[in-house]
Image (cartoon, rainbow, N blue to C red):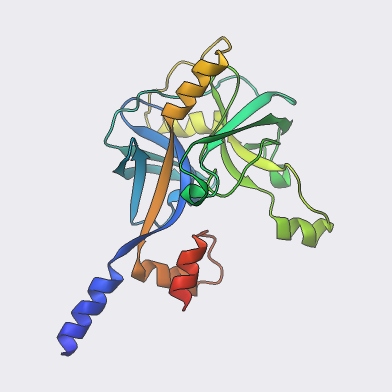
Amino acid sequence: KKRIAKEKKQEEDNKTYPVSSGTGFAITDAGHLVTNYHVIQECKDILVHYQGEQISSIVISNDPINDLSLIKADFKPTKVFPLSKDTPYLMQEVHVAGYPFGWAYSKSLKVTSGSISSLAGMANNFSNLQFDAALQKGNSGGPVYDSKGNVVAVATEKISYSDAMEQFDDIPENQNYGVKSSVVINFLESNRIKLKTPNTKDVERRILGKTVSEATYFISCWMTVAQIKEILKDEKTQKVMFENIIEDFKR
């Protein structure tokens, strides 16, 4: 009976559940995708959702300091993003593609627009830039791109409501951040990834929309029951999980 109970517990602990989601985008036609490190951090399985399929991926490389990850899935993207080699500038128009709030909101890709409002991130982090296009949970790892269809940054975070209220006693608005393309290019070239040549001319909106929709992907992070329980014990964890998972496993 003890052996059976132990085996049953191990079987239960090894079950996997989707605990969080993010966004990624294709940078080669061999299935290489860029996303945020915090999107895939500690995941047992990382699934790329493509044309109704859930495709397993492997981690090629991580850069936790700059919150970047390079993953590879076994499929051939129909469209690929080039990365901008131009220096970003203030008031430059940008667009952000991704899956805010995951699929709890809806399964379609969402695009928001705005402009670059600062050439540095929080605490004078010049590896990042700030933009005012709307950003939500689930947008992490998505492309921030210009009118040419070149990625100028990887969406990574927005200013915390609670932190802003505590430090400044004010509600934060339109303060969102991304990792500059120059940092992303350095990361990818260090991993011997051959990148697509950047576009030199503006792309018609209709064509750009089609490219973005075919090169941007929903990414889900799956963990075992044992992993979930362990993370929930850690009060310092920075892993953001679905509320229903937190509620179910904290009972």
Pick out the residue farthest to the top.
Answer: 201
Residue 12 shows in this picture: yes
- Taking the spot 43% from the left edge, 42% from the top edge, the residue there is 218
Left or right of 88 on screen, residue 32: left
Task: Pick the residue in front: 147 or 36.
Answer: 147
Instruction: Give the quarter of the image for residue 230.
Output: bottom left
- For the view shown, which residue lies furthest in the right direction? 169
The percent position of residue 192, horizontal first and vertical second, equals: 37, 29
What residue is rendered at 36% in x and 61% in y? 17
Looking at this rendering, what residue extends furthest in the front direction? 106
Q: In the image, residue 237 lies at what x, y percent?
A: 53, 65
Which of the pair 136/160 is nearer the observer? 136
Q: Residue at x 35, y 69 (%)?
A: 225
Left or right: residue 6 compared with residue 62: left
Q: Position of residue 148 (x, y in %)?
A: 57, 16
152 w.r.t. 14: above or below:
above
